[in-house]
Amino acid sequence: MRHGNRTREITVATIVLATLLTTIATGPAYGWAPAARCAFSTLIGVRGTNEPAGTGSANGGRTYASGGLGDTAGSIAAAANADRNLPIYVEALNYPATVYQAPTTTYVNSVNIGVSRLAAEIEDLARVCPNTNILLVGYSQGGHVISNVLAGSNPPAFTSVTLSSTARAHIRAVVLIASPTYRPNQTWNAPNQARSTAGLFPADFGKLNGWTSLEWNAAYTARTQQPMIREWCAEGDAFCQSAWPNGMSVHANYRVSTVMNDAWLFIRSKITSNE
């Protein structure tokens, strides 16, 4: 199944050329500002359990006015903002990201709130920003939220949503890191990931198989459907490998690993593909 609109698939060369032409027309730039909402791409970061919340609220309370990405999603967002040839607006989902928060917010409730708000934000972006590519980055519980938005809940205690066809068409790249929904040997898993043990709330086999896009192979001889999702899970992780509590150090180390750069390069490849 193919997602996305041809008019939104802009090559890097086109963006660079537009940047050069703007510079020639307006003279030298003495500063650089991040993209605004409805830019070429919008990255929504969903932080992990107990990572610091952001401040204020935006977009109907669905996102924070500032902060709230967490270290892992924040590292990938920083790489996106550092690439000045790609106008990418970054926002963080406003949700509890907790295991328990008195008096009633449990892990299940926290994920369900995240699912509801993320789905609403994706729908709103697709309506208000018809030319933006939507990029999703989730770490730990944040990955669980994204996984459930894309393909239903598991187990049934978690909320299920159904995105509109328009909203689905705007999603161009998805990164899941250390999600409790991890299942080994899936087509969207990154190379050399954990192959034996599933997460605490493993997704059904093949749950995300439908999220693909038509892309050229490495030799540029043919186009085939390729996953637009990439998932990382290291051996021994506390949550995506069900190795609690001994795997907490593994769970915390993605942000200082090569996964951050690999994740950004994966996202970049999806929004600069020339079909």
Image (tube, helix red, strand yellow):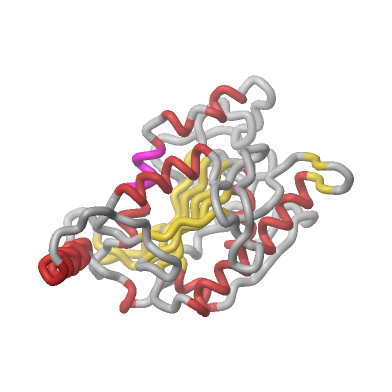
88 or 262: nearer the viewer:
88
**Most extreme residue toward the right, as rendered?**
103
**Left or right relative to 135: residue 224:** left
Magenta span includes 64: no
105 or 200: nearer the viewer:
105
Q: Quadrant of the C terminus?
A: bottom left
193 or 126: nearer the viewer:
126
Q: Say which quarter of the image contains residue 133.
A: bottom left
Magenta part mainly helix, strand or loop?
A: helix
* Residue drawn where x is 55% and y is 68% of the image: 122
28 or 67: nearer the viewer:
28
Q: Which residues are magenta?
A: 260-266
Q: Quadrant of the N terminus?
A: bottom left
On the question of residue 21 being in view, the answer is: yes
> Looking at the picture, does residue 224 appear above or below residue 258?
below
* Residue drawn where x is 33% and y is 61% of the image: 87
> Looking at the picture, does residue 166 appear above or below residue 37?
below
Q: Say which quarter of the image contains residue 152.
A: bottom right
Picture coordinates of residue 212, whole percent (x, y): 42, 63
Magenta span includes 263: yes
* Residue drawn where x is 58% and y is 45% of the image: 47
* Residue drawn where x is 59% and y is 52% of the image: 205
Picture coordinates of residue 118, whole percent (x, y): 61, 62
Picture coordinates of residue 119, whole percent (x, y): 62, 66
- Counting every numbered tag in the picture gives 0
On the question of residue 2 being in view, the answer is: no
**Left or right relative to 152: residue 81:** left
**Left or right relative to 104: residue 48:** left
